[in-house]
Amino acid sequence: MLLSQDVMLGRQEVLKMLLSQDVMLGRQEVLKMLLSQDVMLGRQEVLKMLLSQDVMLGRQEVLKMLLSQDVMLGRQEVLKMLLSQDVMLGRQEVLKMLLSQDVMLGRQEVLKMLLSQDVMLGRQEVLKMLLSQDVMLGRQEVLKMLLSQDVMLGRQEVLKMLLSQDVMLGRQEVLKILLSQDVMLGRQEVLKMLLSQDVMLGRQEVLKMLLSQDVMLGRQEVLKMLLSQDVMLGRQEVLKMLLSQDVMLGRQEVLKMLLSQDVMLGRQEVLKMLLSQDVMLGRQEVLKMLLSQDVMLGRQEVLKMLLSQDVMLGRQEVLKMLLSQDVMLGRQEVLKMLLSQDVMLGRQEVLKILLSQDVMLGRQEVLKMLLSQDVMMGRQEVLKMLLSQDVMLGRQEVLKILLSQDVMLGRQEVLKMLLSQDVMLGRQEVLKILLSQDVMLGRQEVLKILLSQDVMLGRQEVLKILLSQDVMLGRQEVLKMLLSQDVMLGRQEVLKILLSQDVMLGRQEVLKMLLSQDVMLGRQEVLKILLSQDVMLGRQEVLKMLLSQDVMLGRQEVLKILLSQDVMLGRQEVLKMLLSQDVMLGRQEVLKMLLSQDVMMGRQEVLKILLSQDVMLGRQEVLKMLLSQDVMLGRQEVLKMLLSQDVMLGRQEVLKILLSQDVMLGRQEVLKMLLSQDVMVGRQEVLKMLLSQDVMLGRQEVLKILLSQDVMLGRQEVLKMLLSQDVMLGRQEVLKMLLSQDVMLGRQEVLKMLLSQDVMLGRQEVLKMLLSQDVMVGRQEVLKMLLSQDVMLGRQEVLKMLLSQDVMLGRQEVLKMLLSQDVMMYAHFETDVTSLLSKLSQFMQQETSLANCTPQLTYLSSIKHAVLEVTQVANFRLWPETDEEVVGCKKVWNVVYRDTDVGELTWAGVNRRHLNDHRNILSQMDIVLTLPAQSADAERGFSELKLVKSDWRTNLGNDVLTDLLHVSLHTAHIGGFDPTAAIHLWNASGPRTRRPEFVQWDTDSDDYSDE
């Protein structure tokens, strides 16, 4: 408030006033006020003010205040403020302040603050500061801080910083530090860091460093580290590195290392690595190595390895290798090996391999082998293998083989095998095969077989098979077969089968088939069948089917059928069916049909049916339908029908319906209808209806309607109605409504109405209402309104009201209001007028008296400057001048009492602290304090010197003489000497040995008795 534009006080002057003794505010409290939201001063500006020369606060004291709990500023924000350009403090100076004992911040916290996003200091810059001479931190200590959890820097980032050009540390030195005990990093972690992308060191270079003498790591240990999960190097890369020229390791030595227990690599993985493209070893060479005596692997184990997924060798290639001349294995032996449990090859895969072009074995030969006694496979299993996808033999070809003379299987047996669960052939496929030209079976014969007891297929399944796409039989042909005498199925049973879920025929298609000329069924008979209990079709579904395009029946014809005596459906049920979602008829269309001459239903009867519970139409929808253009009913007629006794709707419900969005009637139009003579509803009752919860009209909208020209109600009458007991509206709500934008009443006009005699509200109550949260009027606006001419309240009375308990405004808030722009402009006006009158009065008293009239008064130039300057209204340059003497005195006292510990400082502390800055004056002061002020002191010193020398004579040295002089000159007299301090010092210094003559002996011991 003091810093606002209206008050026009400088910020430094305000800060002086706040820190003065008269205000009696603590520095922390002042800082809290300056940083509050109301003052609207930036934190940088506050810090600049605190560090300015006028405020005279030390930097350490300012930093303590900023980091205190009362100020509630985060450390990151404080650091950001200190490092800003406005404060003009160097980074080294800020770091010294943060690490000082007064601030009491740990080094880890300081590092966390420096590396935060808010401070915006680069990490390299922070590292330079930490390693600088001023900070005096060792490299190991810096590395510990960087790797600590609080700093939250990744190890890769730390390594990148250490290896950067700015830090100027060699790679060997960095590696020594990382592997040292203080850093506590594992070797695997160090290797992971060295191989990361951020460090940008080549793998060959890293391997050289690891195998160097300085690192002192064995080759096995290095290989274990390279193959570990943390390093994330592929095994192929590791093998490539080991076989490279730089490493200089032989292949035999590498193979021994890979197969050793320490490496923990499986043989399959080793084989995969040897056969990879990167290693560049031929397969023959690898096979020789595996079958050699040194490897000691059996042939079965080698075959298992070759056929494993990891090796990624095709089985055909493996079989070629096994059947090659070099391996020298017979076909029988190879087949035994392929079918053995160790190889884990399925029989289908073996059959596929045997029938492949590479093996060059005929199918007859293969079939003989499979059906032989040695193979021991059943016919079903053989058939399953032949029909599998892997063998790639067509089913017709398989069926030819099965029906051939060599197989000697009957057709019934073949059909059982085809329909068995093991073969896994669908029935549709079997039927397709049976009806094919190759099999040469007639359809009647096939149908007999399907319906026979042996096949055990239900009629629904048979019909589903016949109607499937694979069989390729037309539906008319199937229906003729079902209705034929041979099948012996009734029409109801046929219809039930056609409508079943298994057949998957649409109901429209079934109805179309029933009404076709071929079936020769009448419509009445079809409708009876559809509505019968056996068919189990709902009436809505039947109606939907009848109205569909496929059936081609008109709506009038359908309505006649539904309302006929044969159907026996009530009108409510028919209307419910017509309005259902399935029928998809518009409501207007249904209403037209009901009001048509053919239906012969009255309007009242139609309205009852529409509003009944069975129809389930909302009242808003019914009203919308009645008011539509198609129905052609007038609004007055509709309103009469709604308010009639037959409809049984309350007035609130009618009003809600009329004001709904669906009806699309304007609110003014509805209000005219309610206030008309025909409706006969009173105004109070109308107001209750408008403000009720059911109507859902806002109070502001209601007030706007009441104050409109159409309603023709006066404002006083409206205010009486709103404040009456019947309306039950609170005064705050009424005031909020009056001050809203919709009502369009001025605030002064509202205030006049509230303070009038008719309203009978007290001034304090009005003020409380104006300052409440609900009214949402600014306090400055309220003060302006109270001080206006229309309200006619005195200023003292306004101030009493503002500071009263009812208003509940704090003194600070009142001061802020008084110092606001509007109030201060008025105060400036009064000040200008007062100064104008006072200066004119003073001038007239001194110069314009008739007794002391002089000729100079006739000259306008003598009074032009003073009078014209004074007569200017709102002249901000003519404020009363400040008392410079008093201000200067306060400056002196602020300088004297700024540091409260001035009297507690010693000369030694002052001399040590400011010796470099004030060397000349301090040396002179030291001389003044050293030399005695009087000659008596010097004479006393020389006399004591003579006495000491006479006592000690030649045994006296320089150090002893100095100590004795200090004791004799500065200690108390022997009569007032207190030895308590010396005794405490002797006891506190610890236990010590005693002299032998003071040691207590045990007289009862044997040694003592012997003596």
Image (spheres, rainbow, N blue to C red):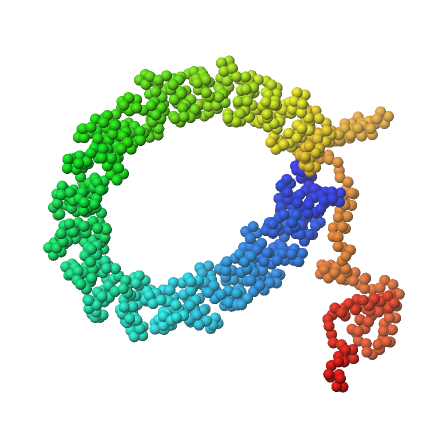
Residue 923: % across, % down: 77, 62
To which quarter of the image does residue 558 belong?
top left
Position of 672 with respect to 319 (left or right) is right
Residue at point 31% right, 31% down? 538
Q: Quadrant of residue 758?
A: top right
Q: Pinpoint residue 201: horizontal percent, then vertical percent.
A: 44, 63
Number of marks in picture:
0
As drawn, the residue found furthest toward the front would be 453
| Residue located 75% across and 45% down the image | 21
Asked if one can make out residue 719 in the rendered structure from this viewpoint, the answer is no
Q: Position of residue 297 (x, y in %)?
A: 30, 71
Q: Is residue 535 left or right of residue 663?
A: left
Q: Which image quarter holds the N terminus?
A: top right
Looking at the image, which is closer to me, 62 or 45? 62
Q: Is residue 663 visible?
A: yes
Q: Foreground: 368 or 157? A: 368
